[in-house]
Image (cartoon, grey):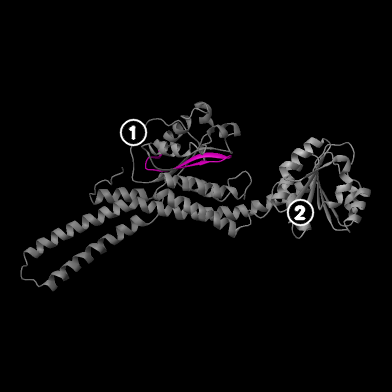
């Protein structure tokens, strides 16, 4: 990855080649802050028009636009990489939502193998803020399908995106990159799932309206918790949150009455004393017939008395405990990410070989056509002087000359088909010069 340069004019600028290249230009969470990314986002009402505008850029053969909260990137296939970098930079800048000079400071450019690697890593969630999150693959598929529908994705990007999807599937099935929680709130869900056989139908209580507690409550609801009880010193705020959670608000002073109903209790309240202490939990457990309770204290300073943890069937975790779980899981994900990167590298090699084979096709076709034209012309001259030959003899001569041409071309064509990044361009140019072939049409 590199920041987009100011490209100075040169003698080769503007000249297309026969070698197709993947070029990606845009902003993402690595280099661009959210205030830049959000200004470049393409809304659903303008997305198709943006694709059509992209298709009018002469240097762009195919294009797909990605627009998520973490990235706005334009993926293209082109025969003129330098011109495409400039054109895509202008394409994004022309929206006039971010000052050109500021945008240029945040743009990232990926070309060739690095562009394919970037797209594969994005699909596999190796480039996400939270490595292993599953949402990005679905988003990528939607952007690709939208571009295919409008008609801006062709043969090269079809292959490139489908390869990216298969990479993502391999990473998810062959590694454990998405199996561990890496945020405090998701760690709370992971621990709760270990204590209870299932979260389905469980009841949770949120004490207070702190951000971390609210996020944990949302995670628990998303993972099966059936009922949410909400209590807060300001009852109106409890009512507001309960409405969002489709839960039940209760007055703060009645916390003890409702506590026995809760399988999971989340503390997220600022206080200078413990809100929950052992006597209250002993009473709650007795009423629950000693069914286990899972307590998460997300407050700083803590508002659940640490002595609670000594009570049998009570499992208390504070913010540091959850942070430790998340950190261990980050380390585990990092190890799994190494396996995923190896998968990406192998698939990039496979895609590069396929793309390279496309570059050789026009030269191979031209070489075969020229050799066949010479063979037929010379054969016809010879047969014209041998009028008494039988049809069998004529067929024999035709087969013999065909075999000679095929054997002579076998070596050059095999070499042209073989993927070698250090010499493939040299062989293509050499073949056209040695056999006096016309330059393939790059349009």
Range shown magenta: 64-81
Q: Residue at x 73, y 45 (%)?
A: 246
Tag 1 or tag 2, which sits nearer the N-term?
1
**Within 10 Å of the Cα at label 1, are there few (<14), some (14-19), or many (20+) other Cα atoms?**
few
Q: Is residue 168 magenta?
A: no
Task: State which quadrant residue 177 falls in.
Answer: bottom right
Q: Is residue 147 above or below residue 378?
A: above
Q: Position of residue 291 (x, y in %)?
A: 85, 58
Task: State which quadrant residue 248 falls in.
Answer: top right
Q: Residue at x 23, y 52 (%)?
A: 435
Q: Position of residue 179 (x, y in %)?
A: 66, 55
Q: Residue at x 79, y 39 (%)?
A: 238
Query: Is residue 139 rendered to the left or right of residue 222?
Result: left
Q: Position of residue 82 (x, y in %)?
A: 40, 37
Dot 2 and dot 1 residues touching (CB under 8 Å) = no
SS label for mark 1: loop
Of the two numbered discs 2 and 1 in the rendering, the one whose residue sits closer to the viewer:
2
Q: How far apart are the alpha carbons under marks 2 and 1?
A: 63 Å
Give 132 or 31, whichever is nearer the viewer.
132
Residue sitting farthest toward the right: 279
Q: Main secondary structure of the magenta part?
A: strand
Q: Position of residue 295 (x, y in %)?
A: 82, 49
Give 192 or 124, whichever is nearer the viewer.
192
**Within 10 Å of the Cα at label 2, are there few (<14), some (14-19), or many (20+) other Cα atoms?**
some
- Give residue 191's mark: 2
Please state the total of marks drawn on the protein image. Answer: 2
- Give residue 11's mark: 1
């Amino acid at each position: 990855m590199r920041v987009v340069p100011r490209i100075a004019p040169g003698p080769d600028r503007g000249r297309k080649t026969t070698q197709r290249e993947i070029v990606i230009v845009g902003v993402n969470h690595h280099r661009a802050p959210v205030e830049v990314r959000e200004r470049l986002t393409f809304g659903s009402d303008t997305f198709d028009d943006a694709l059509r505008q992209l298709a009018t850029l002469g240097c762009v053969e195919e294009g797909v636009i990605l627009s998520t909260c973490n990235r706005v990137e334009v993926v293209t296939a082109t025969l003129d990489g330098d011109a495409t970098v400039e054109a895509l930079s202008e394409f994004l800048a022309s929206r006039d939502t971010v000052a050109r000079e500021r945008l240029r400071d945040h743009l990232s450019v990926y070309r060739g193998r690095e562009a394919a690697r970037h797209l594969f890593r994005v699909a596999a969630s190796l480039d996400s803020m939270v490595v292993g999150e599953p949402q990005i693959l679905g988003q990528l598929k939607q952007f690709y399908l939208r571009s295919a529908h409008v008609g801006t994705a062709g043969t090269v990007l079809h292959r490139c995106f489908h390869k990216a999807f298969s990479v993502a599937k391999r990473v998810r099935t062959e590694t454990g990159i998405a199996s561990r929680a890496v945020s405090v709130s998701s760690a709370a869900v992971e621990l709760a799932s270990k204590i209870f056989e299932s979260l389905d139908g469980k009841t949770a209580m949120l004490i207070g309206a702190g951000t971390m507690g609210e996020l944990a409550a949302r995670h628990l609801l998303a993972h099966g918790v059936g009922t949410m009880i909400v209590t807060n010193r300001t009852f109106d705020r409890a009512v507001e949150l309960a409405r969002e959670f489709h839960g039940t608000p209760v007055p703060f002073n009645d916390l003890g009455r409702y506590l026995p109903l809760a399988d999971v209790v989340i503390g997220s309240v600022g206080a200078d004393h413990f809100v929950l202490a052992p006597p209250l939990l002993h009473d709650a457990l007795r009423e629950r017939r000693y069914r286990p309770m899972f307590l998460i204290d997300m407050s700083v300073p803590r508002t659940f008395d640490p002595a609670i943890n000594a009570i049998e069937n009570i499992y208390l975790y504070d913010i540091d405990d959850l942070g430790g779980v998340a950190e261990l899981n980050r380390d585990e994900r990092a190890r799994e990410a190494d396996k995923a990167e190896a998968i990406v590298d192998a698939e990039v090699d496979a895609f590069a070989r396929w793309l390279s084979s496309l570059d050789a096709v026009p030269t191979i076709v031209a070489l075969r056509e020229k050799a066949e034209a010479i063979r037929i012309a010379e054969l016809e001259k010879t047969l014209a002087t041998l009028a008494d030959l039988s049809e069998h003899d004529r067929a024999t001569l035709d087969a013999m000359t065909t075999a000679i041409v095929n054997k002579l071309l076998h070596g050059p064509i095999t070499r042209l088909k073989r993927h070698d990044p250090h010499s493939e361009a040299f062989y293509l140019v050499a073949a056209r010069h040695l056999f006096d072939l016309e330059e393939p049409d790059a349009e």
